[in-house]
Amino acid sequence: MSKKETTTGEEFEDFLNFAIKYKITKNPKKSDLRKIRFAVPSSQMRKKAISLGMSEDIFCELLSKQTVGDCLIGKEDAAKNTREVFHPTKEEEEKDCEYCNSLLEKGVDFEKLQEGLSFVPPFKEFLGVGRSSR
């Protein structure tokens, strides 16, 4: 019996069927495995704002211009969040401390977090404003 010659297209189709059947994927990078999402603790926001010399008024103003999804945060919510960051109640401080401890237990590096905050609102806009006025 003679073997039928296969065309390049048929070989590709065979390979594609094999790949689909076995769901071949590239190995995930180790850095991809360590990415987690979390809310930034108020104490870390406060620390970043203070380190940049950012006033409460500027923080509030820039925060009020941010959007969550399609909704503008607005002045009222920005003022509330600014108060929580700069003047937390005793209860808010305790919750923040507990939250920070849980993040530390999960391996969050607060030094890297502080560096990364420069690239998120409202700090990104604050630093951008500072650069453009020089």
Image (tube, rainbow, N blue to C red):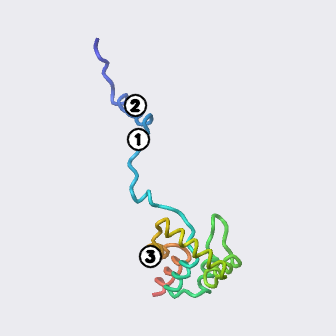
Asked if the residue under mark 1 is in contact with the one under mark 3, i.e. CB atoms within 8 Å, the reply is no
Secondary structure beneath label 3 = helix
Q: CA distance from mark 3 to mark 1?
A: 37 Å
Instruction: Name the disc covering residue 4, or none.
Output: none
Q: For the N terminus, give its image quadrant.
A: top left
Secondary structure beneath label 1 = loop
Instruction: Name the disc covering residue 13, or none.
Output: 2
Secondary structure beneath label 2 = helix
- Residue situated in front as seen by the camera: 47 or 134: 47
Q: Amino acid at mark 3?
A: Glu
Asked if the residue under mark 2 is in contact with the one under mark 1, i.e. CB atoms within 8 Å, the reply is no
Locate residue 71: give its quadrant.
bottom right
Q: Amino acid at mark 1?
A: Ile
Q: Is residue 26 above or below residue 72?
A: above
Q: Residue 73 in the image: state x and y as whole percent.
A: 66, 72
Q: Look at mark 3 in the image and give the residue it sits on.
A: 111
Q: Residue 55 vs residue 3: left or right? A: right
Q: Look at mark 1 in the image and give the residue it sits on.
A: 24
Asked if the residue under mark 3 is in contact with the one under mark 2, i.e. CB atoms within 8 Å, the reply is no
| Crowd band around label 2 with a 10 angstrom C-alpha radius: few (<14), some (14–19), many (20+) | few
> Which residue is located at x 65 percent, y 82 percent?
90
> Farthest residue in the left direction?
2
Closer to the observer: label 1 or label 2?
1
